[in-house]
Amino acid sequence: MQRRSFYRVNVPHGTAGFCALIVQNGKRINLAIQNISVGGVCLYGRDPLIAALQRHQTVRQVSFSLGDYLRFETDIFIIDRTVRLEQGKGEVTNLHIRFENLPPRQEVALQRSIYQLEMSVRYP
């Protein structure tokens, strides 16, 4: 399968795409997946604990789920963190993430899942 590292697909809202990670104080944060590629992911959420996550930080053993498509765990590197204000909903934090040390087998499974997501969006 051809690797398309810069190809990103938006995760449809009907798909249970989420990420779970543990911050330094041992608390769990659940974030939604906005879009994903083999190289990384964009996450978003409203949890106040997200403030503990900073740019250029590595987080170990982060769990990802793409609904029925795929579940995997990997280390991540936070490239950027932005906060935006949604009218009537409050602050939303976006985390731009690069996958670290993704094994080749998981990379292939992720590429297949991205393709399946793409097809589910194009041909519902």
Image (cartoon, rainbow, N blue to C red):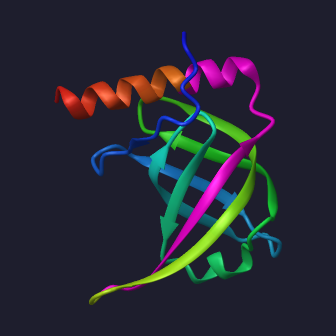
Expressed as whole percent of the image width and height from the top left, the position of residue 50 reads 63, 76
Indicate yes or no whether the magenta region holds residue 94.
yes
Expressed as whole percent of the image width and height from the top left, the position of residue 90 reads 39, 88
Front one among 21 and 4: 4
Tell me what residue is drawn at x 49 percent, y 65 percent. 44
Expressed as whole percent of the image width and height from the top left, the position of residue 3 reads 58, 20
- View extreme (top): residue: 1
- Seen in the picture, residue 93 relative to 76 is either above or below; the reply is below
- Seen in the picture, residue 109 relative to 63 is either above or below; the reply is above
| Side (left or right) of 118 relative to 59 | left
Q: Quadrant of the C terminus?
A: top left
Tell me what residue is drawn at x 56 percent, y 75 percent. 82
Name which quarter of the figure residue 109 lies in. top right
Expressed as whole percent of the image width and height from the top left, the position of residue 123 reads 17, 26
Q: Which residues are magenta?
A: 89-110
Q: Quadrant of the N terminus?
A: top right
Tell me what residue is drawn at x 53 percent, y 38 percent. 37
Name which quarter of the figure residue 59 lies in. bottom right
